[in-house]
Amino acid sequence: MPPSPIRKLAPYADAAKAKGVHIFHLNIGQPDVLPPDQFWDAIKAHSQGVLAYSNSAGIAELRNKAAEKYTEMGIPVSPEEVLVTTAGSESLSIAMSVLCDPGDEVIVPEPMYANYIGFSNAIGVKIVPLPTHIEDNFALPPISEFEKVVTDRTKAILICNPNNPTGTIYSEEQLESLRELALSKNITLIADEVYREFVYSGSRPKSVLELQGLENHSIMIDSVSKRFSLCGARVGFLVSRNAEFNACAVRFAQARLSSPTLEMHGVLGAMDTPQSYFEEVRDEYRRRRDLLVKRLRAIPGVICPDIDGAFYATVRLPIDDGDRFAQWLLEEFRHNNKTVMVAPASGFYSTPGHGKNEVRIAYVLNESDLNEAMDCIEEALRVYPGRV
């Protein structure tokens, strides 16, 4: 099981904080935006004495409401096609477990969300990485590159759209090409769509569940963590129209008994959040994105690609090693008794040696803090002993 590039440096951050150093956390996608009031109101209103197990598939009211919201969005599904999970993380783990036997393969563009690697290792599934490159904004490779790595052990293609850790958005034309490949090779297309609301140019990307003819070959991963700023609630959704897949997924859900009962009731309330909430949050992150890109591109030697969605940037720095740089920031570097915590990008690559001089930055801080964090990074790059 690989260490998380997002969390593995926490002991160094804790040691720095114990010495009174202020740390700007750019390592983890923990929004500082407040959740909608509707979530807390539903939590406070819920009182049933004993906090009991819920149905393994999720409370019926939440499955009904989720199906209703997806349908309003143009993704018609029934409550029976929605499984409530313990966050999007469990959705991904269950999806891989249902589709794959040990030794089977899942194709994933890299860099990828680091936990894809952990989930696959835990169940004995082989990740087949398909490289993307910072020079072309981590664009999805042509479909011919996917075709080259499909084998008789390939069970799925997994994409994240909008992408974590790069902020890249895949077009409808690219999704259609993946649809055709999935059908021709009889494999499943899994789409991690948890950053659907965080799109800064144009409308939301098309969902994998909107692709015609892919009803039995598509799975959507969703979560409330980022959409409602509820990372600690641990509630997600696994959505598919494939009845055989859903029947097996429920058995995995039964094995863990149930998702968090109280939080599901809170999320049920959050589902009534007005659209204005999401518009304000998106505008806030657009401003943060613009600030981050402007500051990074002004630093000599830094390569910052275009960022169209989510709230991450994978950037190349003039350094010898991202892991060493990230640890040095916490152990040795101080700027006005402040420093920055970033996630080394090597942990977002399955291919050994890739991403060595890159880091992932989560721009989840307000503009004032983000500006100070960029001051720290600019000064750190000036004095870092391993600068290249």
Image (tube, helix red, strand yellow):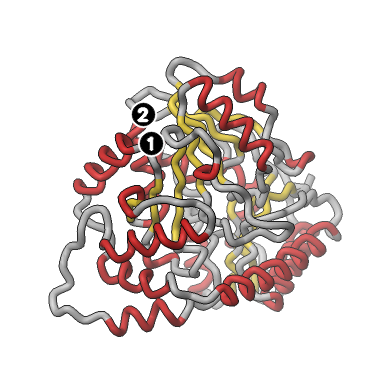
Q: Is residue 155 left or right of residue 101?
A: right
User: 327 and 61: which one is in front?
Assistant: 61
Residue 377 versus residue 114 in the image, above or below: below
Q: Which residue is mark 1?
A: 96
Quadrant of the rendering where the C terminus is positioned: top right
Q: At which x and y percent is residue 272?
A: 44, 74
Residue 146 visible from this viewpoint: yes
Q: Is residue 381 left or right of residue 125?
A: right
Query: Residue at the location (61% across, 18% down)?
Result: 148
User: 130 and 253: which one is in front?
Assistant: 253
Q: At which x and y percent is residue 257?
A: 19, 53
User: 95 and 28: which one is in front?
Assistant: 95
Q: At which x and y percent is residue 1?
A: 39, 39
Kindly identify the amino acid type of the residue bearing the numbered disc 1: Met
Kindly indicate whether the residue at mark 2 contacts the one at mark 1 (C-beta within 8 angstroms).
yes
Give the label on residue 100, or none: 2
Q: Residue furthest left?
A: 50
User: 354 and 33: which one is in front?
Assistant: 33
Q: Residue furthest top?
A: 152
Indicate the quadrant where residue 60 lies.
bottom left
